Amino acid sequence: MPTLAERDHAVLWHPYTQMQTAPLPVPIVRGEGSWLIAEDGTRYLDGISSWWVNLHGHAHPHIAARVSAQLHTLEHVLFAGFTHPSAVELAEQLLEILPANQARVFYSDNGSTAVEVAIKMVMQYFHNQGQPERRTFICFRDSYHGDTFGAMSVSGRGAFTAPFGPYLFDVEFIDVPVPGREAEVLAQLDAVVSRPDVAGFIFEPLLLGTAGMVTYSVEVLDELVRRCHRHGVLCIADEVMTGFGRTGPLFASELLTEQPDIMCFSKGLTGVLWLWASLLALVSFMKPF
Ligand SMILES: Cc1ncc(COP(=O)(O)O)c(C=O)c1O
């Protein structure tokens, strides 16, 4: 009789895994708070909260009860031309805790697609403004924004993006302004930000997770965003990882005086309310379209 891990190995692909050489996966059958319990009873402390998603612990009774109640009430309704109480209540409650310039919420389905939607919103904004030439994004060289094509395009290039290189759109990379390199990176931004084709700047605020928990200061991010705004460049804070308390405040962007125009959330939010998936908050200058 094959084990669960062997059955997995016969039928599944795993992300970021070289399937030819990877050991069999650990078969987890249950979660309990911070603990994951394997088939053989071994308990694993979920130190990375399942890739930063699980903020409140596994199998949280309150979350399970609310998700179950929602499933028994209404599991889904198309969102074009229809709405439902949970969608409105969640948006209202989020806008109460988000930075004050955030005025509207757009629901997507995960971190990558939240980023995808943010990129498209910037593109569509300039299209609607009659400035289609504004199409270039500025990004940090070591950033990670997800695995869809737009998200990969604005992420650092490496082994995982190499097979898709010809399909990714060009961006302008600047370095992460780690301590001691702030002036150099501000000069890199200055060299591109005033160009008429620049549309947006996307960043993981204060902490780049996948790059290896690389940090940079509030002051330099404030200055980068300020310089972008001076040139009409829209700023997207990808808080998929940093959101919901990961850097201390509820959102890393709260520490800024110069607020981003668009914010992306997923992990912490969907770990709690996975049924409602991830979302984007839009600023007031964007009208419904
Ligand atoms: C900063 C950041 N943005 C986007 C993503 C992509 O999120 P998802 O895996 O939900 O598509 C991640 C995932 O690790 C992330 O850390």
Image (cartoon, rainbow, N blue to C red):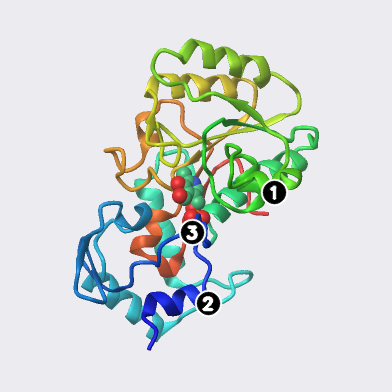
Inspect the image, locate mark 1, and give the three-letter code of the amino acid beneath it: Phe
What residue is shown with label 1? 164
Residue 250 location in percent, x, y? 31, 43
Give the image location of residue 19, x and y in percent: 52, 62
Residue at image mark 3: 21
Residue wearing tag 2: 11
Q: Earlier in the sequence, mark 3 or mark 1?
A: 3
Q: CA distance from mark 1 to mark 2?
A: 24 Å
Looking at the image, is mark 3 or mark 2 nearer the viewer? 3
Along the line of sight, the residue nearer the viewer: 86 or 266: 266
Q: Secondary structure at mark 3?
A: loop
What is the spatial separation of the Cα atoms under label 3 and label 1, in whole angstroms? 22 Å
Q: Is mark 2 within 8 Å of ligand 1?
A: no
Residue neighbourhood size for the residue with mark 2, other residues' Cα within 10 Å, grouped as few (<14), some (14–19), many (≥20)? few
Q: Residue at x 22, y 62 (%)?
A: 44
Relative side of 27 to 279, left or right: left
How many numbered discs, if any? 3
Judge whether residue 104 can be spotted in this image: no
Give the residue drawn at x 45%, y 82%.
74
Residue 95's spot in the image, x, y percent? 41, 50
- Label 3 with label 2: CB-CB less than 8 Å: no
> What residue type is disc 3 on?
Thr
Task: Work out which quarter of the rendered image holds the C terminus and state it.
Answer: bottom right
Residue visible at 65% across and 47% down in the picture = 150
